């Protein structure tokens, strides 16, 4: 069977088309739109223009699926609609305009789905720490022998930090300090605090972008998914300069992350330090695969 899974996120809206049968699935196609919904939020309200952007993207994805004769579409939203005060109004408008019903997943469910996608779908180690850094939230999950021991969803992401603190393209020294203070404060409240893990499995656009930049700098194969934590720390230190060389490097490797990579790296760098991480494994699967496994295929864990 074939289906489309749409992740309506704070920074990107992504469509993944899968063929699945039993407990097995295969990704057929990915499509991404940089919608930047977090940038349309003011005083906790997603503006009509932001809702319209979501409707336009979802209508395009729906038409694409219909062209492939795929009628089974599942749409879920994370912090993009979860962390606003007009969630129900946004959902009603999207349903009226597009005919699509959006499920808003809780922070704890998002953490669970990311964990399921990375471990069952992505082949991550069955014991460790998982970090999913998105545009509007960050999920941290500590797990052992395939089972979650603690987890949390933090109300900060690469785009939400950029929108709140950064006035230019790159954060100034003072803006970086403000971002750092919020990140450290949120990590202090994290339920996974106290966990020490040498290896971290990473999910989300920030971590994928960090891996691409590290591989580019070191001349490593771009398909390499294992990155030493010290390379990520060095990358953040280098990019903080915010000069023309920084801009050229980002535009060459991850142009769609030019404004969010530094706030995202601030989160990642703080996580690496807090949990004493030595290596990062970038998972090819994440929350969309977790949603597919649990909500569509009925898989809730390892066999």
Image (cartoon, grey):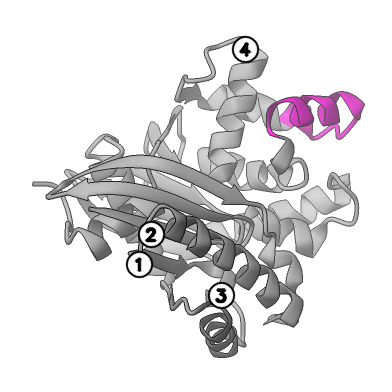
Pointer 3 or 2: first along the chain: 3
Q: Secondary structure at mark 3?
A: helix
Badge 2 vs badge 4, beta-carbon distance below 8 Å = no
Residue 139's spot in the image, x, y percent? 46, 57
Residue 129's spot in the image, x, y percent? 36, 43
Pointer 1 or 3: first along the chain: 3
Q: Is residue 289 above or below residue 281?
A: below
Residue beneath disc 1: 109
Q: Which of the pair 104/273 is nearer the observer?
A: 104
Span colored in magenta: 237-254
Residue name at image x 16 percent, y 48 percent: 21
Mark identifier at residue 111: 2
Mark identifier at residue 218: 4
Residue 211 appears left or right of 202:
right
Residue 138's spot in the image, x, y percent? 52, 57
Badge 2 vs badge 1, beta-carbon distance below 8 Å = yes
Residue beneath disc 3: 81
Packing grade of label 1 (10 A; few <14, some 14-19, many >=20) is some
Pointer 2 or 4: first along the chain: 2
Q: Secondary structure at mark 2?
A: helix
Query: Is residue 37 shown to the viewer in this render?
Result: yes
Q: Is residue 186 above or below residue 286?
A: below
Distance CA(mark 3)–CA(mark 2): 16 Å
Q: Main secondary structure of the magenta part?
A: helix
Residue 66's spot in the image, x, y percent? 43, 60
Q: Is residue 205 magenta?
A: no
Residue 93 appears left or right of 175:
left
Q: Which of the pair 176/208 is nearer the observer?
A: 208
């Amino acid at each position: 069977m074939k289906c489309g899974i749409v992740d309506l996120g704070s920074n990107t809206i992504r469509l993944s088309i899968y063929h699945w049968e039993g407990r097995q699935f295969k990704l057929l196609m990915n499509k991404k739109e940089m919608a930047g919904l977090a940038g349309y939020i003011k005083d906790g309200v997603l503006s009509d223009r932001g809702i319209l952007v979501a409707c336009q993207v979802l209508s395009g994805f729906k038409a694409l699926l219909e062209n492939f004769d795929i009628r089974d579409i599942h749409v879920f939203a994370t912090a993009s609609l979860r962390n606003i005060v007009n969630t129900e109004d946004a959902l009603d408008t999207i349903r009226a305009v597009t005919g699509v019903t959006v499920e808003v997943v809780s922070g704890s469910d998002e953490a669970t789905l990311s964990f399921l996608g990375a471990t069952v779908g992505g082949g991550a180690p069955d014991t460790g720490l998982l970090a999913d850094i998105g545009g509007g939230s960050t999920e941290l999950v500590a797990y052992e022998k395939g089972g979650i021991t603690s987890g949390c969803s933090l109300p900060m992401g690469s785009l939400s930090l950029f929108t709140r603190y950064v006035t230019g393209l790159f954060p100034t020294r003072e803006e970086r300090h403000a971002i750092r203070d919020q990140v450290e404060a949120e990590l202090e409240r994290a339920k996974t605090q106290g966990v020490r893990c040498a290896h971290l499995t990473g999910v989300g656009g920030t971590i994928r972008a960090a891996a691409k930049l590290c591989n580019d700098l070191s001349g490593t194969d771009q398909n390499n998914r294992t990155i030493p934590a010290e390379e990520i720390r060095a990358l953040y230190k280098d990019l903080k300069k915010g000069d023309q060389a920084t801009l050229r490097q980002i535009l060459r490797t991850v142009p769609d992350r030019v404004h969010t990579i530094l706030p995202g790296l601030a989160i990642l760098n703080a996580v690496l330090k807090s949990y004493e991480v030595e290596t990062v494994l970038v998972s090819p699967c994440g929350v969309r695969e977790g949603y597919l496994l649990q909500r569509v295929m009925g898989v809730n864990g390892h066999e």
